[in-house]
Image (cartoon, coloured by chain):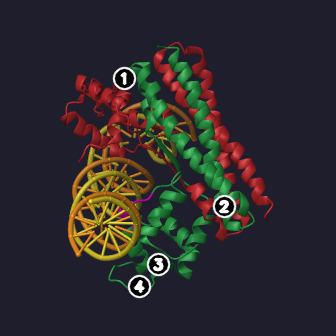
Chain colours: A red, B green, C orange, D yellow
DNA sequence: GCCTCCTTATATCAAACTGATATATCATTT
DNA sequence: AAATGATATATCAGTTTGATATAAGGAGGC
């Protein structure tokens, strides 16, 4: 089988915007797409090595003056084609892994207070993240004419819409659980 | 480090309701908690072996008449304690990995039609899954007095609320993308 | 009776990914 | 001058996925 590495597409996608180092890629994953995707150094660096061998990306000469090593990558024609092929694949895997819901599902073996507390922890995290997303959205509003910004905007609104639904659910769930105390 | 296996808690949680085989566990993961958690045979069977050695679960004698092997497991006192400890842990990892959003984020390198099509595929899947969740909810409505059923109910409403938010977002996103054609 | 197909059931493996750790340089603050 | 934190590459053990192997039981057709 082989070649089922999603991290490759993340790297190609990010490099299609600009040249980046492995460290830059990790930062962009965390900051820009972190609310719907994850990626670690342990998958990024090996992938960069293999993708360079495969000719999807290439190393840029290190122009920095100091001795500090820093490897910038640029996407190749082959890489861009691979990215476009993937975009047109019908199959997409959309997976949640929500430990908070897992704890809630099995929460019947403990007092309702435990489940309420777990929902509250989740709620606080979502509230904080929602503020960040709203801040992103307000910044994007000014430059929506740009095509790439529209795609960014759509993912941000996905986050905002779902997070707002989460918060409403949190309020109703806590209420139902409190009736059991 | 060691012992960061979430599958253990899924197994303990399911066994806290009733005795199950590995195959039963896989079925319950897919059917009951599949919209917010995943689990494969490749993680279930090895975990069952190790958890039995650790004394959190025990094998039940095979009472089936035929030669067909079938191993039922029951949770032990130690297992129940481990489950309750985990429920009280403040830290929970809640991760989305939405390939549809990834494709949308990088969709600027292709025509808007490609992104619209990807949203439509996602939309159809969500509509179908939402119907299943609504059917679950209507069945649960009758027996909400039971404590375990309340916890099940709360996870189902989480699914319904978020899926409905997804669908609203799909409609608005498609509209915005169609303006670019 | 026999053949086919689907479901039940356990088990293993390569490939992918995470989270932690190691190492070292550079920049800023104390 | 020392300490702290950010930048940067790299590797590893442990976890998980998705696929595959194996085999028995049941349902239906002919």
Residue B87: image location, x then y, percent: 61, 65
Please tell me which of labels 3 and 2 falls first in the chain. Answer: 3
| Mark 1 → mark 4, Cα distance in angstroms | 61 Å
Please tell me which of labels 2 and 4 falls first in the chain. Answer: 4
Q: Are marks 3 and 1 in contact (CB under 8 Å)?
A: no
From which residue to which does the magenta span run? B39-44
Q: Are marks 3 and 2 in contact (CB under 8 Å)?
A: no
Residue B26: image location, x then y, percent: 44, 64
| Mark 4 → mark 3, Cα distance in angstroms | 10 Å
| Mark 1 → mark 2, Cα distance in angstroms | 47 Å
Up the image or down, A37 lies above or below B111; here it is below
Residue B23 in sight in this render: yes
The count of marks equals: 4
In the picture of the structure, the residue carrying the numbered disc 2 is B151
| Mark 3 → mark 2, Cα distance in angstroms | 23 Å
Q: Do circles 2 and 4 both sit on a common chain?
A: yes
- Looking at the image, which residue is at 40% across and 18% down? B111
Q: Which label sits in the foreground, 1 or 4?
A: 4
In the picture of the structure, the residue carrying the numbered disc 3 is B73
In the picture of the structure, the residue carrying the numbered disc 1 is A18
Any mark on residue B20, and which?
Answer: none
Please tell me which of labels 4 and 3 falls first in the chain. Answer: 4
In the picture of the structure, the residue carrying the numbered disc 4 is B62
Q: Which label sits in the foreground, 2 or 4?
A: 4
Dot 1: chain letter = A
């Amino acid at each position: 089988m082989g070649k089922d590495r999603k991290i490759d597409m993340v790297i190609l996608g990010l490099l299609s915007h600009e040249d980046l180092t492995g460290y830059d890629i990790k930062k962009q994953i965390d900051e820009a797409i972190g609310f719907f995707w994850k990626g670690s150094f342990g998958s990024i660096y090996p992938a960069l090595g293999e993708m360079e061998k495969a000719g999807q990306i290439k190393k840029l000469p290190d122009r920095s003056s100091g001795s500090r090593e820093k490897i910038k990558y640029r996407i190749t024609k082959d890489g861009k084609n691979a990215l476009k092929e993937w975009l047109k694949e019908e199959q997409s895997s959309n997976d949640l892994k929500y430990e908070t819901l897992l704890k809630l599902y099995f929460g019947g073996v403990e007092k309702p207070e435990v489940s309420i507390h777990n929902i509250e922890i989740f709620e606080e995290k979502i509230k904080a993240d929602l503020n960040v997303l709203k801040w992103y959205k307000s910044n994007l509003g000014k430059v929506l004419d740009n095509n790439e910004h529209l795609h960014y905007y759509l993912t941000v609104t996905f986050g905002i819409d779902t997070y707002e639904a989460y918060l409403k659910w949190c309020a109703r769930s806590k209420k139902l659980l409190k009736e059991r105390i």
